Amino acid sequence: MSLPSSFYRYQAEIEAELKSVVGERTLPLYAMLRYHLGWVDEQGLPQENRGGKRVRPTLCLLACEAVGGDWHSALPAAAAIELIHNFSLIHDDIQDKSWKRRNRPAVWKLWGEAQGINAGDAMYALAPLALLRLRRRGVPQGKITLASCLLNQASLRVCEGQYMDIDCENRLDISLDNYQETISRKTVPLFECALRLGALLGTDDHKLVSQLRSFGRTLGLAFQMYDDVQGIWGEEEIMGKPLYTDIRYKKKTLPIIYAFQKAEGEEKKKLLSIYAKPRISAEDITQTLHILDLLGVRGYIEQLIKQNYLQALQELRMTTLPSPAQQELEEVATFLLGQEPDR
């Protein structure tokens, strides 16, 4: 499925804003940031951008334009959100011992865990500095202060979600409610924040801002479910990292949680035996995949994703947004969740 046109419309401006924040600082620390953001190779030489799709900043700018604002004014907020997202990715790779990101070695794999932590911290520290650049765009101070508060709240929730995710690794009593609570912190906040900040910077209509926030929440929930499915049944080249990493490191993603709840008898005993091991082998992964197939896990989760997708569209269609703006946001949701257009 090809990228929606909005990703191309904003891409150059997003990259320019990010580059102006990160700057041409000569300390090697910033070369690590530029590498992670996809602008240079590990020797620091320029390369074709490999920094990902910039989903969250694109949603921010789409929301601003959708409510009638000038999306250029929201660029500092879009950059700040992307920096927070990438801070979380750098640290997540270290915590998960995931050595590959976007089909290249992760930052920590090249520079070590300690310097990887520094790189993530620097990315985090740059985000509020990026947000303050809203002043240059003529945004009122009151909105900048509110935007700063919302971004910090979202950042804290991401950290809470990562704590919960790691805490669940060695537990076998994780429920679907536990899962939803975790992703409501780990994944949802930046989706919510992106759409909320974009709308806030484009309008004073609080109801419309709230509606787009709700759309962002439902979209974020469905996106994490879809990502969990892709982590097991997706294509490694598209994912940009090895498949089955979540199983290997005993992450309690939705497929595994549902399998533990549905499994009985020998299937349940086998799952318990595998997940009680200190390390999961390639044979254990194969057996786990077989059990997931027997239980129909993928079909169940794909149905959940579809339900959330349709709910997100319903929330969007209840807004007073112009039809072209609604359609563009729907196209993004359809792409992100691997769905067929609901028309």
Image (cartoon, grey):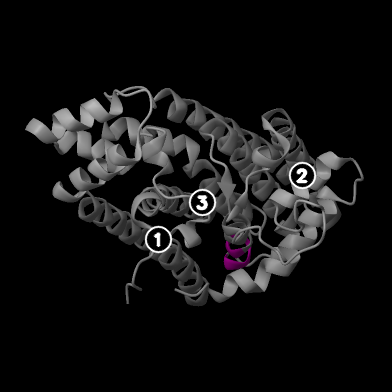
Check contact, mark 1 vs mark 3: CB within 8 A. Answer: no
Check contact, mark 2 vs mark 3: CB within 8 A. Answer: no
State the quadrant of the C terminus.
bottom left
Q: Mark 1 = which residue?
A: 337
Q: Mark 3 = which residue?
A: 241
The amino acid type, in three-letter code, at marker 1 is: Leu
Instruction: State the SS at label 2.
Output: helix
Q: Count neighbours of disc 1 (C-alpha within 10 A) and say few if under 14, some if 14 to 19, many if 20 or more.
A: many
Q: What number of labels is visible?
A: 3
- The vertical placement of 122 against 191, above or below, is above
User: What range of the chain is rendered magenta?
Assistant: 62-66
**Residue sitting nearer the eye, 269 or 335:** 269
- Distance from the alpha carbon under mark 1 to that under mark 3: 19 Å
> What x and y, as percent, mark residue 284?
28, 37
Q: Which of the numbered marks, if any, corresponds to residue 32?
A: 2
Q: Earlier in the sequence, mark 2 or mark 3?
A: 2
Question: Quadrant location of residue 128?
Answer: top right
**Residue sitting nearer the eye, 192 or 88:** 88
- Residue located 61% across and 57% down the image: 60
**Residue sitting nearer the eye, 207 or 276:** 276
